[in-house]
Image (cartoon, rainbow, N blue to C red):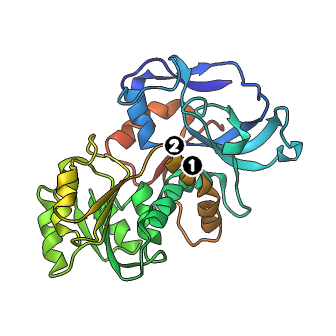
Amino acid sequence: MRAIVMTSAGGPDVLVLREVPTPIPAAGELLIRAEAIGVQYAETQLRAGTFPMPTATPAVFGFEAAGTVIAAGADVDRNLIGSRVVATTNGTGAYAEQVAVDTRSAIAIPDGLSTLDAVAVAAPGAVALTLLETAALRGTEVVLVEAAGTGVGAYLTQLAGEFGAGRVLATAGSDVKRARARTFGADDVFDHSAAGWQSGLRESLGGTTIDVVFESIGGESARDLLDALTPSAGRMLSYGMLSGRPAAVAAQDLMSRGLTLTGCGGPAWLRRVADARADILARAAARTVTPLIDSVLPLEQAGLAHDKIERRAATGKVVLTPMG
């Protein structure tokens, strides 16, 4: 079968189309005929060597695929064959025509939801739901969603009002993404690519403050927001580092203001995110949340997909498809 192999850490050109053996599902596994393969920002960091690969290279790359179950290993319900699922891997195996996955990672795609939309919404939408549940909004609070025009931020913006946000502020790095954030419910949108954008944010607040920041930029940008948070009650949920660095916030920065910072990561966090995938797929099928697809590219253009994401040129999920 055809698959994208990561030959070593490096630029997008290390993702090479090759013929590899078709996987055989082991006990507890399903074999999926992939129809839609999600490309994630985190994968670009893994490919670049910012984070270590879970297995030695060369290896078939990829975290996430959706399609039809065509075989099942031992101890797996045979009735699953023929069903549509979206599933995750440990970081290898998904950029391929056929993908073996642990049955526990596979979530049924509801009727009425396309496979493309399912892979677009499953991962970022589940993160957004988990962030909102963690924030425990009370109905009147002011929230700030960073990078709200695409990815997790776009789903946070769509869902924040339902989960108790009284006012939704947002950031985005382009005119197109700022316009999209407004259509999704943001009351005010700021350009986080502009130097000192936090000053404009503080001016727009007047005498009010921000209760919750969904922080995905990291670096000094996070620290520069602290004085805009509600003293003794403000909280920052850190879940990304689009700047390339984690939030530059020290314990003393929080203690002197009475703020909290929650790091949204680690095994327990990822289990919560995985549990939220069925909920976000159901919402997408019911049309209460809008899946975002930037483009659908053939499997052999995996390098182009990574380049597009790294240039911040994508306005939604970039999806690979091995289908002719």
Q: Using the image, determine if residue 47 lies above or below residue 207.
A: above
Q: Using the image, determine if residue 201 lies above or below residue 238.
A: below
Q: Residue at x 49, y 77 (%)?
A: 162
Q: Which residue is mark 2?
A: 267
Q: Position of residue 320 (x, y in %)?
A: 55, 40
Q: Residue furthest right?
A: 78
- Amino acid type of the residue tagged 2 in the rendering: Pro
Quarter of the figure with the C terminus:
top right
Mark 2: secondary structure = helix
Indicate left or right for 220 with 301 as reference.
Answer: left
Q: Is residue 296 visible?
A: no
- Amino acid type of the residue tagged 1 in the rendering: Arg
Q: Position of residue 47 (x, y in %)?
A: 42, 28
Quadrant in the picture for residue 225: bottom left
The 10 Å Cα crowd at callout 1, few under 14, some 14 to 19, many 20 or more, is few
The answer to whether the residue labelled 2 contacts the one labelled 1, judged by CB atoms less than 8 Å apart, is: yes
Q: Which residue is mark 1?
A: 271
